[in-house]
Image (cartoon, rainbow, N blue to C red):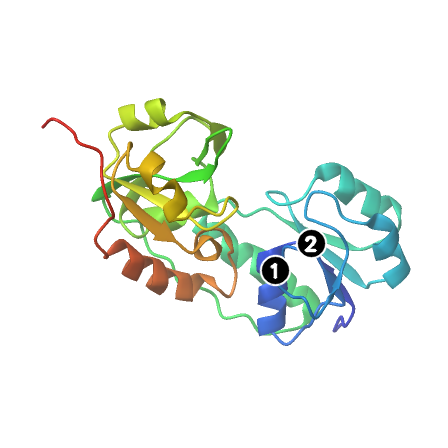
Amino acid sequence: MSVARVVSLVPSLTETLSTWGVTPIACTRFCERPDLTHVGGTKNPDLAAIDALAPDLVVMDAEENRREDYEALLEHGHEVIATRVRSLEDVNQALGTLSTRLNVVHDATRVGAAPVATRRAFVPIWRRPWMALGQPTYGASLLAHLGVEVVGPAGPYAETSLDDATALGADVVLAPSEPYPFSTRQLHELTQVAPVIFLDGRDLFWWGTRTPGAFVRLGAALATTPTGGAAREQ
């Protein structure tokens, strides 16, 4: 059965649905779709607004959205598909389930074994407090398939400090543009850890139909010369 009325609470799924020709009737304010109705954020969706829209399907993700909102939507009688993507291998399973439900064609992304890592990267995702990308996450899995080992505190998204990050001995800092908008304004701080490469955070964290292109764009970014760097004794 084809579904026309979909509410997306996940930016990467909003993008994927649009690529499939399924325009959501509403999405979050983080989905970069000012032309669509917004129903709050990923962590605080407007449940009453969603109820009023009477969607056929609400799509969520365990990494992006809260379990209590998922349960509330089910209690309100909505059909919900909640994905859980923590690796590249999870992407095809999630999109396969969704494409089947929506009766659209999905071309699976082919993913081979990750190569032996040739670089060690510290990937900050927040500042004040400092937080870093860890395992298991889609971003770390994507970087692994580009030959980059993510180093940081234990857990997928954990607090850290620049002193602790420096002690990890990373070769490079990969500073994404989201969820925290890292830019050259933080360059002085980040170069205490290692030379810095700035990345489009959407390519690192938005999975789905973006994934194949993200491989290419991130690969090109990783091939650039890092900016600055901490002085280390060899």
Looking at the rendered structure, the secondary structure element under dot 2 is loop
Residue 65 horizontal side relative to residue 183, left or right: right
Residue 128 horizontal side relative to residue 60, left or right: left
Task: Mark yes or no: residue 89 visible.
Answer: yes
Residue designated by label 2: 9
Looking at the rendered structure, the secondary structure element under dot 1 is helix
Residue 234, picture quadrant: top left
The residue shown at (51%, 58%) is 92
The residue shown at (40%, 44%) is 185
The numbered mark at residue 13 is: 1
* Amino acid type, label 1: Leu
Report x, y in % for residue 89.
45, 51
The numbered mark at residue 198 is: none
* Amino acid type, label 2: Leu
Quarter of the figure that contains the N terminus = bottom right
Real-space Cα separation, disc 1 to disc 2, in angstroms: 8 Å
Residue in front for this viewpoint, 95 or 45? 45
